[in-house]
Amino acid sequence: MNKSDRIYIAGHRGMVGSAIVRKLEAEGYSHLIKASSAELDLRDQAAVQAFFKKQQPQYVVVAAAKVGGIMANKTYRAEFLYDNLMIQSNLIHAAHLFGVEKLLFLGSSCIYPKLAPQPLKEEFLLSGFLEPTNEPYAIAKIAGIKMCEAYHHQYGSRFISAMPTNLYGPNDNFDLEKSHVLPALLRKFHEAKVNGTDQVVIWGTGSPLREFLHVDDLADACYFLLKHYEDPQFVNVGYGEDLSIRALAEMIGEVVGYEGQLVFDESKPDGTPRKLMDVSKLKSMGWSPRIGLREGIRSVYEGYFMQEVAQRLIR
Ligand code: GFB
């Protein structure tokens, strides 16, 4: 990739897309192509093809998706399936039609079977039943992987795929119903501390295990793969360690400085008991994450807290 190449980051405003933009800008890439969802509805095939015809991107990163936590996935099943299938299919097909040199598709660790052996190796894909709460999203992402593989096979397209573990970082979604666990708990602990509430409700039993990767590490891995990876086989991108939701909540409480009680609401789903990624493939290529969980949580909390203060000032 040359610094003046035209690189389209689909989903540039999201947590992942904005991290990839930050990384490419830091590396001196001067021609980044962006379009907000108001400017370009990626579910509209004709609009996407007109955009590719006009912009002629040389590289494409598919960081646009309808995403959310366990309750959002459980609730909005049709939207998670339809929107993600349309977004990724339009982008991948347009990349083929308009001769994009290389495309990176981003999926998720939820593509693996609910009870697959741990840590999850890439070859475990489709070896068992999926986790019901996020099956629509997982099926969409598996279709994206298979589409990139099929275009590589039939047309020789340089379309590669990466499967990140649970992510967190700047620009995350802090909506308490639709977000993922880490930002949701950061907000819950912060508000409990500010409001003097004596307990924080954690969904589920607290026993599931989750792995967390800072989105700046993911962006670094994406840059690494764009530059060095040509194999159609998708690659796990993870941190390599996991912890229980209870331990995560205790860590977030310590970072926020909250000393109240944790209460577990078992009416909410636990989801997959564990989904630790086997990261040996990417490690063998020379990439490793750098941001530890506690320091990552602290930096995200500082950003969130400063935003809170700023918003209070303008209210
Ligand atoms: O992060 P999360 O929503 O998604 O939930 P998944 C992880 C675990 O944290 C679940 C528990 O066991 C939740 O019950 N949890 C505890 C909470 N308190 C909370 C809370 O306040 N909010 C949330 N959201 N969870 C997602 C998939 O699964 O993983 C997505 O649904 C995507 O499609 C993402 O693949 C990476 O990790 O269970």
Image (spheres, grey):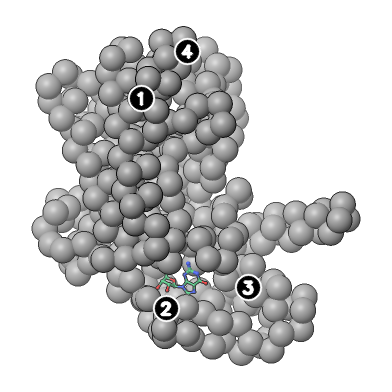
- Classify residue 189 by image quadrant: bottom right
The residue at label 3 has a CB less than 8 Å from ligand 1: yes
Q: Nearer the viewer, residue 204 or 217?
A: 204
* Residue 8: % across, % down: 47, 23
- What residue sits right under mark 3 in the picture? 188
Binning the other alpha carbons within 10 Å of mark 3 as few (below 14), some (14 to 19) or many (20 upward) gives many
Q: Earlier in the sequence, mark 2 or mark 1?
A: 1
Q: Earlier in the sequence, mark 4 or mark 2?
A: 4
- Classify residue 257 by image quadrant: bottom right
Is there a contact, CB below 8 Å, between mark 4 and mark 2?
A: no
Locate the N terminus by quadrant.
top left
- Classify residue 261 by image quadrant: bottom right
The residue at label 2 has a CB less than 8 Å from ligand 1: yes
Cα separation, mark 3 vs mark 1, equals: 40 Å
- What residue sits right under mark 2 in the picture? 268
Is there a contact, CB below 8 Å, between mark 2 and mark 1?
A: no
Cα separation, mark 4 vs mark 1, equals: 15 Å
Q: If the picture is divided into quarters, which one holds ligand 1?
A: bottom left
* Residue in the image at 57% along x and 71% along y: 185
Q: Earlier in the sequence, mark 4 or mark 1?
A: 1
Which numbered dot is residue 55?
A: 4
Q: Nearer the viewer, residue 100 or 315?
A: 315
